[in-house]
């Protein structure tokens, strides 16, 4: 199942810089691991925002829910999920 996911990140400005760096490093490692597994198919930055647009390929909505909830930055995100299906005009 494919999903288009928009993640807008809003880390509190008063968060300790060391804690912030550790959180961002864990997020990057988790993201890259999911990409290697083929579950996080695409990720793009949104220009001018701390935001990304991603495509996930997972087996179920429950699996996507677990993937998203385990993102280290999830507590600081606003997430929008859209289910995708093949378009009849696609090659």
Image (cartoon, rainbow, N blue to C red):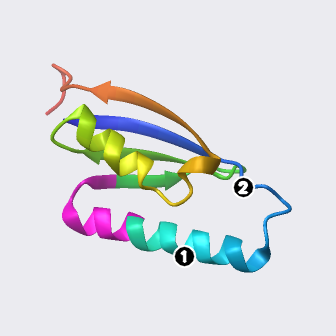
Q: Residue at x 50, y 39 (%)?
A: 6
Determine which quarter of the picture holds residue 77: top right
Residue 22, above or below 41: below
- Rendered-image quadrant of the C terminus: top left
What residue is rendered at 64% in x and 49% in y? Answer: 76
Label 2: how many Cα within 10 Å (few below 14, some 14–19, many 20+) = some
The residue positioned 31% from the left and 26% from the top of the image is: 83
| Chief secondary structure of the magenta portion | helix
**Horizontal and vertical percent position of residue 41:** 29, 53
Residue 26: % across, % down: 50, 72
Kind of element beneath mark 2: loop
Q: Mark 1 — residue?
A: 25
Residue closer to the observer: 89 or 81: 81
Judged from the image, the secondary structure of the residue bearing numbered disc 1 is helix
Disc 1 to disc 2, C-alpha distance: 14 Å
Left or right: 86 in relation to 41: left
Q: Can residue 46 be seen?
A: no
Mark 2 sits on what residue?
Answer: 11
Give how far across and how far down residue 45 sits, in percent. Answer: 56, 54
Q: In the picture provided, is 63 more to the left or to the right than 29?
A: left
| First-in-chain label (1 vs 2) | 2
Residue interval drawn in magenta: 31-41
């Amino acid at each position: 199942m494919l999903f288009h996911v928009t993640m807008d990140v809003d880390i509190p400005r008063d968060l300790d810089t060391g804690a912030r760096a550790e959180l961002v490093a864990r997020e990057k490692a988790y993201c890259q691991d999911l990409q290697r597994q083929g579950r996080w198919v695409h990720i793009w930055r949104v220009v001018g925002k701390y935001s990304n647009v991603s495509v996930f390929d997972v087996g179920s909505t429950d699996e996507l829910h677990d993937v998203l909830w385990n993102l280290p930055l999830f507590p600081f995100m606003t997430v929008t999920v859209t289910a995708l299906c093949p378009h009849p005009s696609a090659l």
